[in-house]
Image (cartoon, rainbow, N blue to C red):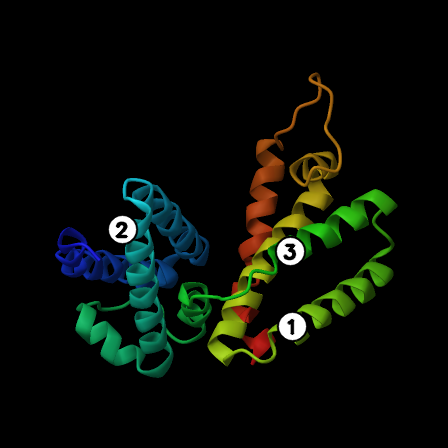
Amino acid sequence: MTEDLEAKSDELREMVENHWRNLIRLSGLNPQMAGEEVFRFEAMIDQMALTYTPVQAAWFRSTVLALRARYADWERTDPDALRQALKVTGGGKGTATAWLANLETPASIDLRDQLDTFWREILVTGIPNPKTFEARSAQFIGKLQAQVARLPQPEQDGILTRLILRNSEYIALAQKDREVLKAQLGVFVPSPSVSTAPSAIAETAVRATIWYSIGALVRAFR
């Protein structure tokens, strides 16, 4: 570990603290924006890691992950103390931020490739009627839950929360523009004359579907 990166510890802590201040404030105003803040922050971390050597990048990522996990656990166990430490007044709390703590928890398993494979199979064979699709989806999710059952509950919640958000996105896109979803998952590549981008109306519907039931997200795994 280099001295330069060790000197950045305080800077990284401040960066994660500011990230959590944004999450708390946004969650009380707009859950969609709070969720997007998580993914924006992760994209920023990926870009910053590219500026380091492999050894430095490994330290940088592990430090940020540990800090995010610390504040996520703090949010779960004593949210009032966290807000006092961060000097944040107002904002979301309880179910409004519990699912964000899930997203901030490091995960040792990534099930998204399995979800993508499930959707490719569905798109190739044809999306069945709602009742059949619901049954197949429940069976598939049950299989994934079994894979993470041995993990600590916070990590399980984090993995499954990300899975639900991704699955919600696919369901919404399948309803509005199935060909775009096929292209996104590599099932079908449209001809150059076919637009690969959903219309503004479809995009709005997709985003609304993803975030509409965020309040129930945590309850699904408790």
Give the spatial CA distance, label 1 vs label 3.
17 Å
Give the spatial CA distance, label 2 vs label 1.
32 Å
Residue 167's mark?
3
How dense is the environment of label 2, judged by Cα within 10 Å: few (below 14), some, or many (20 and up)? some
Which amino acid type is shown beneath numbered disc 2? Answer: Gln
As drawn, is 153 to the left or to the right of 45? right
Label 2 or label 1, whichever lies nearer to me, is 2
Give the spatial CA distance, label 3 vs label 2.
34 Å
Which amino acid type is shown beneath numbered disc 3? Answer: Asn
**Point 72% across, 70% down: residue:** 143
As drawn, is 104 to the left or to the right of 198? left
| Residue that mark 1 sits on | 147
Give percent across and percent down for residue 123: 79, 45
Chain-order first, disc 3 or disc 2: 2
As drawn, is 179 to the left or to the right of 100? right
Q: Is residue 109 above or below residue 52?
A: below
| Residue that mark 2 sits on | 56
